[in-house]
Amino acid sequence: MTKTINDVYMQLYKRFKEADEPQPSLAARELTAYACKADKAHTAEWGHVYLDDATVDFAHLLCDRCLDGEPLAYILGEWDFCGLTFQVDRSVLIPRADTERLCELVVERARQKVSPRILDLCCGSGCIGIAAAHMVEDARVAAVDNSDGALRISRENARRLGVQRRYLALKADVRFRPPNGMGQFDIIVSNPPYVTRAEMHGLDKSVYQYEPHEALFGGEDGLDFYRSICAKWSSLLAPDGVMLFECGYRQATQVAAIMEENRFAGIGIAEDLSGVQRIVYGYNANLEPDAV
């Protein structure tokens, strides 16, 4: 029997629902649109478009992969963050809603400056720095990662989102001192690897088997990158500059203590959009600032 796009959507929705997928409607809609080359913004038309058997089979094959644990974002090759669509592959972590409040704080601070300079450390897909450059038209962003794959993806995302002239991606390892000649930045932001050794073994299959471990593992206690960045990269912070971190849901006070040990001023903790204390910030000790 010939099936419409909507028929396929309902079939995938039922499969996801029976498998206890947290967001069965979202997963079914995204996979259906991708497999059927359909516009997910015009689902009302899906009931009138008929498909060949190969397309139907392809949609179910993609569903099989998703139900087997492969992240939907990697199947689609893209994911949304702060209202923008970012290209992703298995060389970068999938952008998550947990990080959107961190990006909002970066944007709020950047808008207080003229031609602000932003440094995004452990940039991955580039979602934080690129979203900030997209929302603050005079911002200039330098992005750092130690992964060639991540740098490739971040540069492509900057190009696709039209900010490539104000976005520079550099290869460097934040566990060592920064390259010479980088200058100073009004904002340094980082969502570094912060999963502990014990937590690595308890990660969901879709994370542990598919997302890059080097972008997840933060050392025995998950805090190695915070120590290095605070000790070795804070010299790049402008006199009234702010450094902001994302951290694990139980790490905020520990990250704040690391910033205190490294003589940051005005240290504070903020919640993400789900009310979790996931953001830690501090200012250059040379100038006592207003809070974020």
Image: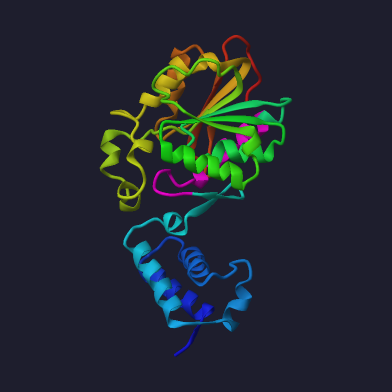
Range of residues picked out in magenta:
88-109
State left or right for residue 84 relative to residue 63: right
The relative height of residue 211 versus residue 193 in the rendered view (above or below) is: below
State left or right for residue 289 relative to residue 63: right
Residue in front for this viewpoint, 181 or 272: 181
The relative height of residue 9 versus residue 155 in the rendered view (above or below) is: below
The count of marks equals 0
Image coordinates for residue 285, horizontal then vertical, percent: 57, 11
In the picture, which quadrant includes the C terminus?
A: top right
Image coordinates for residue 29, horizontal then vertical, percent: 51, 67
Image coordinates for residue 228, horizontal then vertical, percent: 41, 20
Q: Residue at x 60, y 25 (%)?
A: 187
Q: Residue at x 31, y 62 (%)?
A: 68
The relative height of residue 123 versus residue 30 in the rendered view (above or below) is: above
* Quadrant position of residue 220: top left
Is 173 covered by the magenta stretch? no
Image coordinates for residue 88, horizontal then vertical, percent: 47, 49
Q: Is residue 201 visible?
A: yes
Residue in front for this viewpoint, 257 or 16: 16
* Quadrant position of residue 162: top right
Is 89 covered by the magenta stretch? yes
